[in-house]
Image (cartoon, helix red, strand yellow):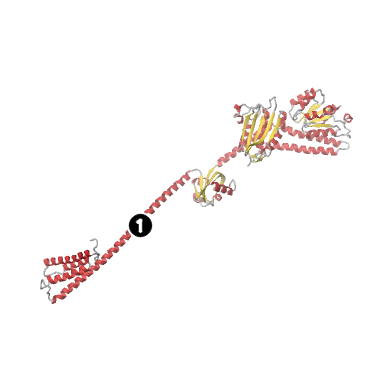
Amino acid sequence: MSEPDTPRSSGMAAVARYALAVACVTVALTVTALLLPNSFFTPLFFLAIIISAWFGGMGPGLLAALLSTLSIAYFFITPLYTFNFKPAHIPQLLVFFISAALVSSWSTVRRRSETLLRRARDEQETKIQERTADLKQANEQLQAEIAERRRVEETLRQRADLLDLTHDTIFARDMNHVITYWNRGAEELYGWKRAEAVGRVSHELTQTIFPVPLEEINETLCRTGRWEGELVHTKRDGSKVVVASRWSLQRDQQGAALAILETNNDITERKLAEQELHKTQAELAHIARVTTMGELTSSIAHEVNQPLAAIVTNGNACLRWLSNDPPNVEEARQTVTRMVKDGHRASEVVGRIRAFFRKTVPQRVQVDINQLVEDVIAMVPSELQRNRVQLQTELTDDLPPVVGDPIQLQQVLVNLVINAIEAMGNVSGRRELVIKSGLYEPGSVLVSVEDSGVGFDEQNAAQLFNAFYTTKLQGLGMGLSISRTTIESYGGRLWATTNNGAGATFQFTLPTSN
Amino acid sequence: MNAPTNNNKAHEKSKASEIPRVSIVDDDESVREAIKSLLRSVGLRANVFASAEEFLKSGALKDTACLILDVRMRGMSGLDLQARLAAAHHKIPIIFMTAHVSDKEARTRALQAGAVDFLYKPFNEEILLKHVYAALI
């Protein structure tokens, strides 16, 4: 029976329940009549009533009670097999019936409450099962999420480990320059551990010295997303470090700036080596200048002797004007005025030579290229005259200035001019030196020194600029080598070509200052 | 032109003529003006020229009794001018001067070609004056 606890469920079920009551009583009657006649006859009937009430409900229970009472009255109370029992048996039968009815009733109630209890329990069970299923599902989701997060974390950790593998210093900072990530390279270079660095303002921590104002860098960074340059940082131990720094800007999906990734390479050693190299080059250039001056000795003597001759002669003239009778003071005054002028002139010559000789750290200043040519021409008049060289200049007006050290650039041009003059030393025909200046291309100025000398063998063209290559009896063969190094250090180029006619042209370019 | 009138040290011959008989050719203005002043201080008059070409063009050649000449100049050099005068049979006494310290070759050539002297700048003014007086006698 799938639905024993719904007694009023249907007509068929009701008939079956009442039939059960009749059957139970019949069985109880039969068994009692056969096995226990005349004696202990009620228990089996009680059993029949309990079963009927239990499985059938209140109605079948009461029917079983009635049928049992009638059966006892008919079969077991004398006179047997009639309902004509003595009045003395009426209380007996009444007690039985009431007891039977009560048993039936209790059994029904008991059964019903038990059914209700079971149903409640079953409902609760169902709910618990449902809830358990929900919890289980939630738990599974949670597990999946945890697994996913672990996987992401693992990936991130692996990536961070990769960043730790590099020798480069890498750190990230937010838009307020507060450090959010600090790799092992940064720990090693600067000396602060990750925990110490994260949360600090990077430029304060490392005392950054910028090549240009920070606002300018930020402007470039925001515009292009990148910036590159050299920074000077101070390490934890107080020592300075020069780094080649690359900044990248991270943006969110809306394009708003989120963070800056800074990758730094320690180039302190390289910078020191570069400085050392520059120093050596400057020393070499100085030696070359001294050598050049050796070649210019007669020019120097000439340049100094001219004003000296004028001063001495004026001095003698002055003495004679004063010793005249009467002394000619006006003429004497004029000679002294000229002496003062020539004294200054001699001093300027000496000053120019001293500047050329001076051992200084090369400067980077704006240089007017035409002024440079004029200065150099002023240094070599004697060389030109002695070698009977005709000088022509074709200077372009209003050239933009170049950047460089005036003395070093003078040295280059003096070198080229002296080389040109010497190249014409044994030429019997015309000796012509042409110095030109002009724009080479936008942002670049050209100076050329053209001679009508012996020229050079194209095969030796490559050797010309080698150190210690020389065709002269005197000289170190350093001039052109140093000149090229100098020009290249200012971003220019120096080269030589042979002329169509006679001689050679040496020329150099220099970038303009803007 | 300058006219020295009150110089008692001036040579007699210079007084006799109003025309300057000394010519100075040097491309250095300071030097030629200084020599001119020196000569004037002793009562002599001089013409000054910045180049050999200028001197030849000026027509002063015919009156020049003494030539003070720089060796190295742009264009025609002192030695070129000397050679040119010799070729034209002008026997003018020439006093050379140079600011170059080692001009032995030029000195030899100049003296062989008949120069009065070859002076290195800065020079002794008494020697110069001595040569000038000698030339003007």
Q: Is residue B55 above or below residue A25?
A: above
Residue nearest the viewer, comparing B40 with A322 = B40
Q: Quadrant of residue A355?
A: top right
Q: Is residue A447 above or below residue A202?
A: above
Q: In the image, what residue occupies the spot 61% across and 31% down?
A: A465
Q: Is residue A74 above or below residue A154?
A: below
Q: Quarter holding the N terminus of chain A?
A: bottom left
Residue nearest the viewer, comparing A264 with A132 = A132
Tell me if residue A317 can be seen. yes
In this rendering, position of residue A79 left or right of residue A212: left
Residue nearest the viewer, comparing A354 with A472 = A472
Q: Quadrant of residue B5?
A: top right
Are there few (<14), some (14-19), or many (20+) residues within 10 Å of tag 1? few
Q: Amino acid at mark 1?
A: Asp
Residue lying furthest front: A11
Mark 1 — residue?
A134
Give the letter of the chain under mark 1.
A
In this rendering, position of residue A378 left or right of residue A185: right
